[in-house]
Image: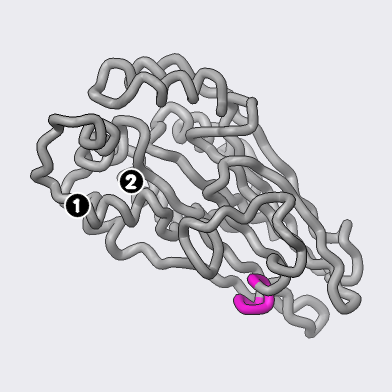
Amino acid sequence: MKIVLFSDVHANLPALDAFFKDIDTKEYDAIYCLGDLVGYNVWPNEVIAEIRRRKIPTIAGNHDIKVKKLRVDQHLNDEEALVNYAYHLGTETSRQYLKNLPCHIKVEFKQNDLPLNLMLVHGSNRSVSEYVLEDLDETYVLELMQESGAHIFCCGHTHKPYHRVIESEGQHLHVINIGALGKPKDGDVRGCYVMLTIDENSSLDNPDSITVEFCRVEYDVEKAAKAVEESPLPNEFADRLRKAY
C-alpha cells in the first residue's frame, strides 16, 4: 500500500498544480490531505475546487477553521484585516466545504493479524494548533500516540518535515511530519509531500519495514510570490515563499 500524504497548501495554486503533475506520474493507492488549504495566498477557491474534483479525503487545519470564524463583512482597513484578507476570498461554497471537514482521519490496517493504525492529524489529536516538533519530549509524544491509538502518527502544521522512530514496549512507532506543500519553512523552497509505504512485510518489530519517502516538487515560486505582492496581503508572505522560512 503506497499512500501519498500532503499538507499546508495555503492557497498556493502553482505548488498544488506542480504536485498533481508529479504524483500523476507515480503509482499510489491512496491519498490524504492533512489540512490548511487556505491562507497566505490568493487561490483558496481554486485549491478547494481541485481537491474536491479529485475527491481527496482532507482534514481541517487551523487556517481552514479560521475561515469559519471570521466575519465575511469585515472591512480591510487595518493591519490585522490585511493579514486576514486571504480568508475573505473564499466563496460560500468553499466556506461550507471547510466547515464540514473532519478533525482527523484514522486508518486501521491488519498486518499478519496484528493491528497497525495510521492516525492523520493537522497539529495533534489534542489540538489543531499544536506543534509536534521533531525534538518534542518523547514521553509526551508517546502520550499523544497512545491516546489516539496510533502506531504511525502523521501531522503537518509546523511546515518542517521529519521522520522519527520511537521504541516503546518492543514496538517501533513512527512519527511523521509531512512538511508543507505550499509554504515550506525548512529552507527548501520546493513543495514537500510524503510517500508512505505499508505492505504485507511491514511490522512494528522492524523500523525499516515501513518506508517514508520525502518528495520535493519544484514549482513557479515567483508566480506565487508576485500574486501575494499584487494583493493586499503583506509582502512578507512573498518573501517567505522565496526563502522558505
Name the spot of residue 24 as percent of width and height, x first.
56, 39
Residue 86: name its quadrant.
top left
Q: Is residue 81 magenta?
A: no
Tell me: 94 left or right of 3. left
Q: Earlier in the sequence, mark 2 or mark 1?
A: 2
| Mark linked to residue 48 | 2
CA gap between label 2 and label 1 equals 10 Å
Point out the stretch of residues depicted in magenta: 144-149
Which residue corresponds to mark 1? 93
Marks 2,1: beta carbons within 8 A: no
Residue at the (91%, 65%) spot, across then down: 206
Residue 205 is at least partly visible in this image: yes
- Identify the residue shown where x is 8% and y is 44%: 73
Q: Is residue 117 left or right of residue 245?
A: right
- Quadrant occupied by the C terminus: top right
Q: Residue at x 39, y 31 (%)?
A: 13
Residue 29 locus on image (x, y percent): 61, 57
Q: Which mark is residue 120?
A: none
The magenta stretch spans residue 145:
yes
Q: Is residue 115 above or below residue 241?
A: below
Dot 2 crowding, Cα within 10 Å, few <14, some 14–19, many 20+? many
Pick out the residue farthest to the bottom.
113
Image quadrant holding the N terminus, namely bottom right
Place of residue 151 in the rendered image (x, y in percent of width and height, measured from the top left): 72, 71
